Image (cartoon, rainbow, N blue to C red):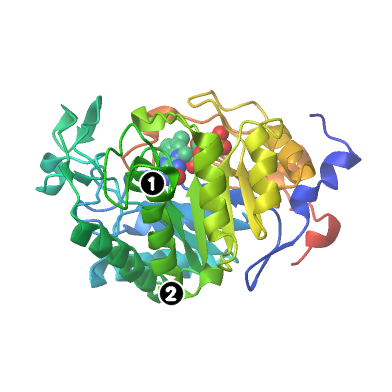
Amino acid sequence: MTMSSATLTSRLFEPARLGALHLPNRLVMAPLTRNRASADGVPEPIMATYYAQRASAGLIIAEATTPNAVGQTYPDIPAIYRDAHVAGWRRVTGAVRAAGGTMFLQLQHGGRIGHPETTGLTPIAPSPVAFPDPIHTPGGPRPGVVPREMTIEEIRSTADDFAAAARRAIDAGFEGVEVHGGNGYLIHQFLSDTTNHRTDAYGGPVAGRIRFAVEVVEAVADAIGPERVGLRIAPGVTANAMREHDIERVYPALVEALADKGLAYLHVVFADPGQPLFHRIRGDWPAVLIANPALPWPTPMPADGGRYAGERLLAAGADLVSLGRAFLANPDLVERFRRGAPLNPVRSEYWYGGGELGYTDYPVLAGPAVRTGTSAGA
Ligand SMILES: Cc1cc2nc3c(=O)[nH]c(=O)nc-3n(C[C@H](O)[C@H](O)[C@H](O)COP(=O)(O)O)c2cc1C
């Protein structure tokens, strides 16, 4: 896309409502795991710098954060189940708020994506189906282990842990939370028939496999109010060895089960609006729909950061567009899009762990901000 007056007046720069919140534009920073918390899950001060640099996003969804010890996926990811975690996150949300930003926190339980060498615990999952690939641990990559099948009691207590984590997230200054139902982690493992072989009420037919997702979302909504809760899903995404055979039945059923709960949003990965599931979900979902234009994964980041694909999804009915790598590499992404300026290339070697390099050192454009459209000063 070339710079033109159309570029400057894109719908991306229109304000939007999200629950009770007013967002200055429709660009959402997608959650991005960066492994820069302390070994016990406390957000480090550098994370406040990183997120504050990106505060011009209409909404930031902070990286996957574990609601309990056994749910931890990888080393140095943040947590939100102890007071020290809350205190660390408070520094981050304070810095983002001071910079004018709005922030949700993504809650992620890894299920079978976890390792005793990281947590000291055997991972738990819907069924004892091992993750087939190596998992990153503090000592390096290790073969996935067979997870222990969750008891009904553990299923309930895990939903309670999500709810407690959501309360703590609000206490830490977030505007809301996003429940991570995608990318092969615990909730996704319940949705898929390849990882869920249960014969009780949480497995089997579609109604059984969506039950855990629905109960987690309900527990979180009861804890902090549905208008502060989003759900991320990734129908058909094969990340983390996920395989699904019936996405055309599972996801419409899940969307239908949650449609009348008054939630803030649904966040979905879509290749493009030509996907039949896009129209189905858009039609059935009454609240805000955030579209993340990336499939199949992994694909290299497009030169425009995903903007063109995002504009197409907006035109087809999405309300907000989330971008991951473009925000990772461009703290001033909104301004760059406004100006039609080129983007910084993303340096993937610094994605997972390390310090400032490839984290807080991406350059911003020089010169005064361009103010356009209705978003000026909002
Ligand atoms: C470094 C990195 C970390 C990611 N971490 C998360 C995460 O914590 N939670 C999540 O839901 N998705 C995560 N994703 C997926 C992104 O949110 C997004 O869906 C993906 O990057 C595709 O969007 P993009 O093309 O705009 O980057 C991650 C992606 C990358 C590149």
Q: Is residue 358 above or below residue 261?
A: above
* Dot 2 crowding, Cα within 10 Å, few <14, some 14–19, many 20+: few
What residue lies at 82% left-to-right and 29% top-to-bottom? 2
Going by the numbered disc 1, the residue's amino acid type is Arg
What residue lies at 38% left-to-right and 37% top-to-bottom? 192
Quarter of the view holding residue 238: top left
What SS does tag 1 mark? helix
Q: Quadrant of the N terminus?
A: top right
> Can see residue 32?
no
Is tag 1's residue or tag 2's residue first in the polypeptide sequence? 1
Viewer-nearest residue: 56 or 115 = 115
Tell me the mark number nearer the camera, choosing from 1 and 2.
1
Going by the numbered disc 2, the residue's amino acid type is Asp
What residue lies at 32% left-to-right and 45% top-to-bottom? 203
Give the CA separation, mark 1 to mark 2. 21 Å
Residue tagged by mark 2?
222
> Can see residue 162?
yes
Q: Is residue 322 above or below residue 52?
A: above
Classify residue 85 as left or right of residue 6.
left
What residue lies at 71% left-to-right and 56% top-to-bottom? 25
Residue tagged by mark 1?
209
Classify residue 105 as left or right of residue 266.
left
